[in-house]
Image (cartoon, grey):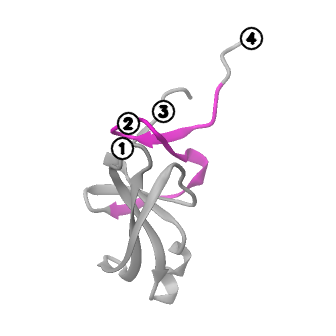
Amino acid sequence: MGDLIGPRLYSCCNCRNHVSLHDDIISKSFQGKHGRAFLFAHAMNIVVGVKEDRNLITGLHTVADIYCGDCKEVLGWKYERAYEPSQRYKEGKFILEKSKIVKEENW
């Protein structure tokens, strides 16, 4: 029998805590504070910070920074509210910055 292949995971770049599944990626064409970022439908093993309004590239949003649940590294943010109707699909979704996550190599 071959090796069993687990779910495709992304982890915190600092401590390797699992933070999201590859299958939860909605888009890879987002911009974070530090470069490219991915939009995920779900995230796990994270802590959601305080909500605040931010002017982002696509307009005003209420967001909350998200932190690794283990080492507290800032990984991105959660969209809490989008003020533009065309941006509402982002509500409840997560931005994880590419530079802050690593793809687990078990797949």
Which badge, 3 or 4, is on the more N-terminal residue?
Answer: 4
Left/right placement of residue 97 relative to residue 19 reads left
Q: Is label 4 or label 2 in front?
A: 2
Mark 3 highlights which residue? Answer: 104
- Alpha-carbon distance for marks 1 and 3? 18 Å
SS assignment at label 2: loop
Which amino acid lies under the numbered mark 4 shown in the image of this protein? Met
The part of the image, by quadrant, that contains residue 9 is top right
How far apart are labels 4 and 2 at the CA level? 31 Å
* Residue matched to label 1: 71
What residue did someone put label 2 on?
15
Discs 4, 1 touching: Cβ within 8 Å:
no
Disc nearer the start of the sequence (4/1): 4
Q: Give the answer, above or below, for where 43 lies relative to 7.
A: below
**Dot 1 and dot 2 residues touching (CB under 8 Å):** yes
Q: Please determine whether, in this image, residue 107 is positioned above or below residue 1.
A: below
Kind of residue at disc 1: Cys
**Residue annotated with mark 4:** 1
